[in-house]
Image (spheres, rainbow, N blue to C red):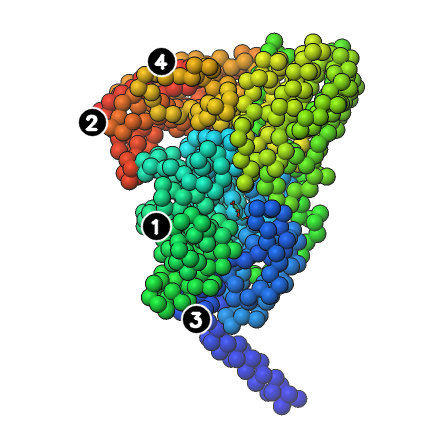
Amino acid sequence: MKNLTFISCLLVSGWLTGATAADKNQPIYKDAKAPIEDRVNDLVSKMTLEEKVFQLNQYTLGRNNNANNLGEEVKNLPATLGSVIYFDEDPELRNAAQKKAMEESRLGIPIIFGYDVIHGFRTVYPISLGQACSWNTALVEDACAVAAQESRMSGVDWTFSPMIDVARDGRWGRVAEGYGEDPYTNAAFSAASVRGYQGKNLADGKQVAACLKHYIGYGASEAGRDYVYTEISNQSLWDTYLPPYEAGVKAGAATLMSSFNDISGTPGSANHYIMTEILKNRWKHDGFIVSDWSAVPQLIEQGHAANRKEAARLAFNAGLEMDMMGHCYDKYMAELVKEGKISMAQVDDAVKRVLRLKFRLGLFDNPYTPKTTAKERFLLPQSLATAEKLAEETIVLLKNENNLLPLNTKNKPTIAVVGPLAKNRPELLGSWYGHGHAENVLPINEALNAEFAGKANLIYADGCDFDGNDTAKFNEALSAAQKADIILLCMGEKKSWSGENASRSIIELPAIQEQFIAEMKKAGKPMVLVLANGRPLGLSKVEPLCDAIVEMWQPGVPGGKPLAGVLSGRVNPSGKLSITFPRSTGQIPVYYNQRKSARPNSGKYQDIPSTPLYEFGHGLSYSTFNYGDIKLAKETIKRNEKIVVEVPVTNASKRDGAEVIHWFISDPFCTITRPVKELKHFEKQLIKAGDTYVFRFEIDPMRDLSFVDSDGKRFLENGEYFVTVKDKKVKFTIED
Ligand code: GLC
């Protein structure tokens, strides 16, 4: 017995000693308790050049549905690969790939898996352009948190979102993906999205790393075409395009994605000024930049690189850390280092940035995604509720003649529901719909049947298709309209008409839809136009024919239910436009914060009014909100003094309603000319019927009144300023 005990003691002590020895011999980078920077430095010091290079490459895994960039499963994924775009919605394939990286590579460095989760993974919520119309950053943050949880539980650690390209040309299909025409709006939703995606702890298994894109100025694409030149002065770079990125970086965004576009002669993906000088040297960003898909070799098409090796050198030396599917870094980087054209120090810095995120995500300590069922991952009740609430708040009531809406159902009216979107599911998902399934979308007809059960008779007729020239079904729709008390026109766009590589030469509805609307007018009944679309539309021809117009954007899974709520009055619309609706394509670009004209009362088009059809911030409610006068705490303040401005808003109706107010500042004259007005704060409040709410904005002169020069230097000039809310405007002065 004694011997046995003795031997077992030896074994135990040996085990312990052995374990202790193993801990002692365990490299720091494998020690979950060691500080991340120590783990990063330790690991890089152990890596070969080849291993470092592969950390800076991203391939694809699984088959994707993006026709612009078809990714095939990489059968022989290199075990040392840094990243993968993951196209599956189940973690199994991902875990198999990860197992290879952890067990078949020398150092066991986990792969980071990315994917385009733009407005939802499976619980798809409204497109971003619509989200911005909610002016509810907290709700957008919640929606991003839903997307993050579904993504992470499905094997995705990193989303290529938020897209924060300021865009003012509706011909550009990707206007759907961002938060509209205004820098401040995009900045507010950039930060909210990052908070939602990343949460407080990237390693908690429910968050994903964010990726601010497309850095930078992609929204200025010439004539709204995609992948083309963008004329962006350094002044515009700083005052218009950079603010959303600065806000996202300040919110802690882990990564950025470099853009396709040529920025006034230097493509975004080879632009040292934006990727190194601004982002790294000035903003001290400690994450990394991934290229857009093949943006590195595309430097050749753009006439910036002679060949792929040159493209690799130019992009990497400009500050681009990771090559997405370009196969330039994997092929040429080692050679370029050996030739002294890329420094090993810069390679080490880039690899550290990638490894730092992998440690922060907990991928070294928990490389595998836990197995769960689809039911455990997707379409959870709370997720659906968040998506529905957001979809309700994105709806913008553009027109409501004689308060036609909400529909009066006292006498159980007959409603003719016509148009290509009346029974459609897939088109309501919008572009970049991730793993959204059409069968999860509630179509408008089913939503109306439920909402108006027992309250109205609903008759349906297609009438026309989205486009083409087939008028064969016009008559059937017209006869339905003649039997009805009200006509509900469900019109708009296919999801493929916006998003990437989806530019359109005109923003008007297709002729067949305009023709159909005119045909329905012949029934002589009140008409409600419902629009589901991914861009501002040119509505000048159809607007006069319709008594009410409801912009529902592309709502995702909630589908027609929020719309039905607005039509019945269950939902009081609160959305306000995040992008101007021009009268016609010819008016583009038209946006609220344009610079002033030398002759404000002339120089206009001869054939149309100079104002847009619907302005930035336009949106009607079923409530009536009366604005009092703006109250200034003081009329003259010092440069370092803050000033509170207030405006009382009364809900003079019998309906509770949410009101959004936008606080604009303007500087009537400045060393560098400024936009006619600039949004600097917004707030949304539910105001009960009959109540008054006092909205407050504390103006911090350096933050809210200053401007930037063409190298980003912020300056504040003394003198007059104005603050505007709706049509109210007050002046105050800044002095030393
Ligand atoms: C696409 C898009 C970009 C997306 C990337 C990966 O080309 O430009 O937004 O994140 O490729 O799919």
- Per the model, the C-alpha gap separating discs 3 and 4 is 67 Å
The dot on residue 116 is none
Residue 48 tag number: 3
- Snapshot quadrant of residue 658: top right
N-terminal label among 3 and 2: 3
Which residue carries the number 2 mark?
736
The three-letter code of the residue at mark 2 reads Asp
Q: Secondary structure at mark 3?
A: loop
Q: CA distance from mark 3 to mark 2?
A: 59 Å
Callout 1: helix, strand or loop?
A: helix
Q: Nearer the viewer, residue 22 or 420?
A: 420
Which one is earlier in the sequence, the residue at label 4 or at label 1?
1
- Of tags 1 and 3, the one toward the viewer is 1
Position of residue 686 in the picture relative to residue 672 (left or right):
right
Q: Which label belongs to residue 601?
A: 4
Residues at marks 2 and 1, CA–CA distance in whole angstroms: 38 Å
Whole-Å distance between the Cαs marked 4 and 1?
Answer: 42 Å
Decide: few, some or many residues near mark 3? Use Cα within 10 Å; few <14, some 14-19, many ≥20. Answer: few
For badge 4, the amino acid type reads Asn
Closer to us: mark 3 or mark 4? 4
Q: How much space separates mark 1 and mark 3, taking CA atoms? A: 27 Å
Which is in the foreground here, disc 2 or disc 4? 4
Cβ atoms at labels 4 and 1 below 8 Å apart: no
Kind of residue indicated by mark 1:
His
The residue shown at (42%, 57%) is 307
Q: Which residue is mark 1?
A: 272
On-image quarter of the N terminus: bottom right
Q: Earlier in the sequence, mark 1 or mark 3?
A: 3
- Label 2 or label 1, whichever comes before in sequence order: 1
Are dots 2 and 4 in contact, CB under 8 Å? Answer: no
Q: Position of residue 160 (x, y in %)?
A: 52, 47
